[in-house]
Image (spheres, rainbow, N blue to C red):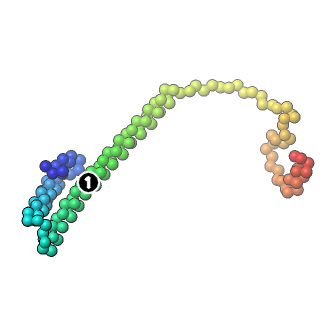
Amino acid sequence: MSDIAKIDKSQIFLPNEYRVLEKTLDIREKIVDKMLEEGIPVKGRDIRVLNEVLNAMDANVLGRVDRRLKREENDSQEEFNKLATEIILNWNKYKQENKTEVIEVPEVEHELPDDMVVPDEDTIEYKELTMEDIIKGARNGS
């Protein structure tokens, strides 16, 4: 049984595609076996034919491996998406079940004694500073 027979055909190939791949692989293997019955060919034409058959076999195998890896990658991505969705749904459910109660805090007077307030600190007025104002402030210690 070739490796291709071990693949889950329902996920990759249509029945006819699978049949053709299996047949061509068998034929290629028979060609290679026949050509190597008397050892490695020495005639240039035979070497070229053998090399082409071997390259076709390699391409066939590499193509199948590539498709299998892509399918496995897609399966992994789907599994990750399901897991991420489940985590998010569980987190939302947890948040709903463990809602925190909002407690109202009574408002408190925020008046400070005059000696703790910097003059004009509570003003929202824009005052343009000049270099002179900054130097005066530095000389006066403010």
The x, y position of residue 135, in whole percent, is 88, 54
Left or right: residue 131 compared with residue 32 = right
Q: At x 8% / y 65%, what residue is drawn?
A: 38
Q: Is residue 20 visible?
A: no
The amino acid on which the numbered mark 1 sits, given as a three-letter code, is: Val
Q: At x 91% / y 51%, what residue is drawn?
A: 139
Left or right: residue 50 compared with residue 124 = left
The x, y position of residue 59, in whole percent, is 23, 61
Q: Is residue 31 above or below residue 88?
A: below
The x, y position of residue 50, in whole percent, is 15, 67
Residue reaching furthest front?
39
Q: Quadrant of residue 27?
A: bottom left
Q: At x 13% / y 61%, what residue is drawn?
A: 28
Q: Secondary structure at mark 1?
A: helix
Residue reaching furthest bottom?
44
Circle 1 residues within 10 Å: few <14, some 14–19, many ≥20? few
The tally of labels here is 1
**50, 20: nearer the viewer:** 50
**97, 72: nearer the viewer:** 72
Q: At x 27% / y 51%, what residue is drawn?
A: 68
Q: Is residue 141 above or below residue 28?
A: above
Q: Is residue 13 above or below residue 52?
A: above
Look at mark 1 in the image and give the residue it sits on. 65
The x, y position of residue 65, in whole percent, is 26, 54
**37, 13: nearer the viewer:** 37
Q: Is residue 39 visible?
A: yes
